[in-house]
Amino acid sequence: MAIERAGVPTVAIVSAEFEVMAGMIADALGVADIPLAVYPGVMLTDSAATFESKVDERVLPALFDGVLVQPGHTTRQEAAEPGRAEIVLRGTYDDILDGFTDRHWTDGLPVVPPTPQRVARFLRHTDRDPDEVLGVLLPASREATVHTVAVNGVMAGCRPEYMPILVAAVEATADPEFRVEDAGSTPGWEPMVILSGPLAKELDFNSGTGALRVGPRANTSVGRFLRLYLRNVAGLRPIPDETDKGAIGATFNVALAEHEAAVRDIGWAPYRVDRGFTEADDVVTVRSVYAASAPIYSCGARATDHLATIARLMTDVLGPWCYHNFIYEKQHPFVVLGPAIAGIIAAEGLTKDDVRRYLYDNVWLDGAWVARYGRGVSGKKFEWPDLVARGKAPAEYADAEETGRPVRGLMRPEWIDVVVAGNPGRNQSRAYIGNHGQGVPVSRRVEPPADREPR
């Protein structure tokens, strides 16, 4: 897009499945009619002969046509969006729900109508100006404002008291490091909100049994809010816009609250301190999750009894997907330790850093499968000797495809997050994997209004 704007003719090459998405993104970026060369079908399932035939007969002619017959670019005529005080619909609840559904403003579930009165109640729980811009969200290139946070918070069924948490979650999502524009990538990853701090107990967030189960209003509505916000403001919709290309997507994650009492009892620092804040802070972290392990049940009186089991099942969920460690050089997995398991580990004097180091040293995968899978996911050249030559893999990995030599599944111990939550009376943990450099953990401090009173 930058080259095109500089006056150099360009053509975008896309597969047929991404044609609509490409048009939507070009439109959002102000060049609605950029030429496309479309590859019909799925490249990675075509034979070499079929691939060459399609390139010769379809892609190359479109490339030449696109370069030689450049249109005079037009700027999209953007439909005016409702003003902040504008009433867009009136009628019964069913009328409102049908109207919002027709406009693709819902997530397929009933919503709470965001009346001016309800929105105003949310805005009273923040000192931020309603028109303050928290960031610009792609692919729609739309401003995320405090007012739109309140509107979507109402629709998601949140309580007004959650407003500072919602603002912090959107600020984290809007940070360029998070890369919200990739939240529609084909792995179908979902953001997860993690809340650490005394506010979780005050607002009745569940951090115990069923910590990630829908049901408790706080956890459920805050998790739903972020998915709804990505649809309505960032513009990430699989239907009809096709700006969300999750191949087999997942549903929203409820918000995860750290078990404050358990962390305090075992003597570990809370998650917010791991993220660079103080114990007095309330902190929201947003991160991507594309896969979760099976429930990790472990037994034994020693820390290693449990850590060995966690490492084994973490290896299973990570699998050859760790190919991206060597291509993108980013990885941010995390482990939710049940309070009982964390207590056993801490009782031996082990810290979270010891947990991270153990997992780093004990998660290994078959190098042949990692290479094969890497080619299947990305379609890119994945050759261990090439990665070694470029300094992206250790020298001993050069023969990993031929020999099946084990390769590390985890990149850096310090990139592994550890959160304590779940049923205190059960021996269960779980591991989660994020999508390399997409949706990396970003944290923001929760800022309640100056005149806030405890519930």
Image (cartoon, rainbow, N blue to C red):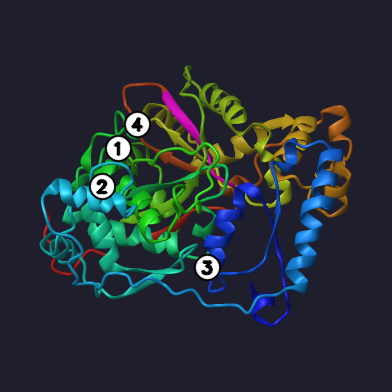
Query: Looking at this view, is 279 or 205 the one in front?
Result: 205
CB of mark 4 within 8 Å of CB of mark 2?
no
Q: Which mark is residue 27?
A: 3
Image point (46%, 24%), residue name: 295
Residue 355's x, y, as percent?
Answer: 54, 37
Quadrant in the picture for the N terminus: bottom right
Is 9 above or below relative to 279? below
Q: Helix, strand or loop at disc 3?
A: helix
Give the residue pinned by disc 2: 200
Q: Earlier in the sequence, mark 3 or mark 4?
A: 3
Task: Indicate whether residue 237 is drawn in magenta.
Answer: no
The residue beneath circle 4 is 422
Residue 148 in view, yes or no:
yes
Bin the neighbour count of mark 2 within 10 Å (Cα to Cα): few under 14, some 14-19, many 20 and up: many
Q: Which residues are magenta?
A: 428-435
Mark 3 surroundings within 10 Å by alpha-carbon count, few (fewer than 14), some (14 through 19), many (20 or more): many
